[in-house]
Image (tube, rainbow, N blue to C red):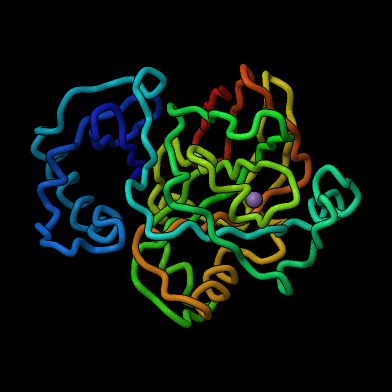
């Protein structure tokens, strides 16, 4: 299933460019009391919600159709507990970052196996329709298209061989970045600097996550174009790595790193980030 969140906290089933409103399936969620869980409750209960959606479809109670390009798209994960990100996870991007002082700013750019992962503020997460408002317009601000895996169940010390069982689904992500000398977690955490969407494709929709074409255009010009087969650490290895340090929870977002071709964006630019099977994030820079 491809599920989006749209307009006024509606839940939608995406079929091509159509959206069927399946908000009523959220009635499958249990009720919670304070303190509320620190994970995303929709993702934690996704199997129950998906079976409710199948029931609605079978009984033809699923409701009005909207058009994907015409709705306000929210982040497919409303409340990620954490956003885990891979710093340099395509070799050609490592080479490009080391060669360009405007990217590395005298920060050491090391291999991911040595530098590990970083965290972005979960308050930076938005959907496509929010757009990206440049937080430091006097600086260089770059787009980074990334394959995003959304964790579906709690786990720690997950073996790489089992790791894909912990994925609820996948989406397109933009890891927006202010270049400069500060720590990555600061420069990549302004409000709106983690764009997710346009929808979540449940894991069963993606036959081989290690062979997905991805690309981003800015104002129609191709800037990054790659394939997830060139990831240094694949999704399973990243989950194993991350979970060897901390527990992963439902709704945790894993940004898998960006390929070569990162470049600057300016207010007024229009970005279109696409990954095979995961749709296109259409995002304005403000
Ligand atoms: Mn990145």
* Spot occupied by residue 246 in the image (x, y as percentages of width and height): 47, 76
Number of disc labels: 0
Q: Residue at x 48, y 72 (%)?
A: 163
Specify whether 37 is left or right of 220. left
Q: Position of residue 127 (x, y in %)?
A: 42, 35
The percent position of residue 139, horizontal first and vertical second, equals 72, 34
Q: Who is closer to the viewer here, 121 or 60?
A: 121
| Res 265 → quadrant | top right
Point out residue 239 in the picture as x, y percentages from the top left corner: 52, 70
| Image quadrant containing the C terminus | top right
The residue drawn where x is 35% and y is 72% is 154
Residue located at (57% from left, 49% from top): 147
The quadrant of the picture occupied by the N terminus is top left
* Residue 175 location, quadrant: top right
Q: Nearer the viewer, residue 201 or 137?
A: 137
Q: Is residue 192 above or below residue 38?
A: above
144 vs 72, left or right, is right
Residue found at the very far right of the displayed protein = 99
* Res 240 quadrant in image: bottom right
Determine whether, in the image, residue 250 is placed left or right of residue 27. Answer: right
């Amino acid at each position: 299933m491809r599920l989006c969140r749209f307009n006024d906290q509606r839940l939608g089933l995406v079929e091509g460019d159509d959206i069927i409103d399946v908000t009523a399936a959220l009635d499958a969620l249990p009720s919670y009391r304070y303190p509320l869980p620190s994970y995303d409750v929709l993702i934690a209960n996704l199997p129950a919600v998906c079976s409710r959606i199948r029931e609605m479809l079978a009984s033809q109670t699923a409701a009005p159709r909207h058009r994907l390009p015409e709705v306000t798209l929210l982040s497919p994960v409303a409340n990620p507990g954490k956003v885990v990100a891979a710093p340099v996870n395509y070799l050609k991007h490592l080479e490009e970052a080391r060669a360009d002082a405007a990217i590395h700013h005298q920060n050491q750019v090391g291999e991911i196996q040595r530098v590990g992962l970083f965290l972005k503020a979960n308050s930076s997460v938005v959907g496509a329709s929010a757009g990206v408002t440049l937080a430091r317009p006097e600086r260089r601000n770059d787009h980074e298209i990334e394959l995003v895996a959304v964790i579906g169940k709690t786990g720690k010390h997950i073996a790489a061989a089992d790791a894909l069982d912990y994925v609820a689904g996948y989406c397109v992500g933009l890891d927006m970045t202010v270049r400069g000398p500060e720590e990555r977690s600061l420069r990549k955490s302004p409000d709106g600097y983690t764009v997710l969407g346009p929808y979540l494709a449940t894991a069963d929709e993606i036959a081989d996550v290690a062979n997905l074409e991805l690309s981003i255009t800015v104002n129609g010009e191709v800037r990054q174009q790659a394939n997830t087969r060139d990831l240094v650490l694949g999704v399973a290895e990243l989950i194993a790595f991350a979970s060897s340090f901390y527990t992963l929870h439902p709704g945790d977002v894993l940004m898998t790193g960006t390929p070569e071709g990162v470049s600057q964006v300016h207010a007024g630019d229009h970005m279109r980030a696409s990954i095979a099977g995961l749709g296109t994030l259409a995002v304005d820079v403000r």
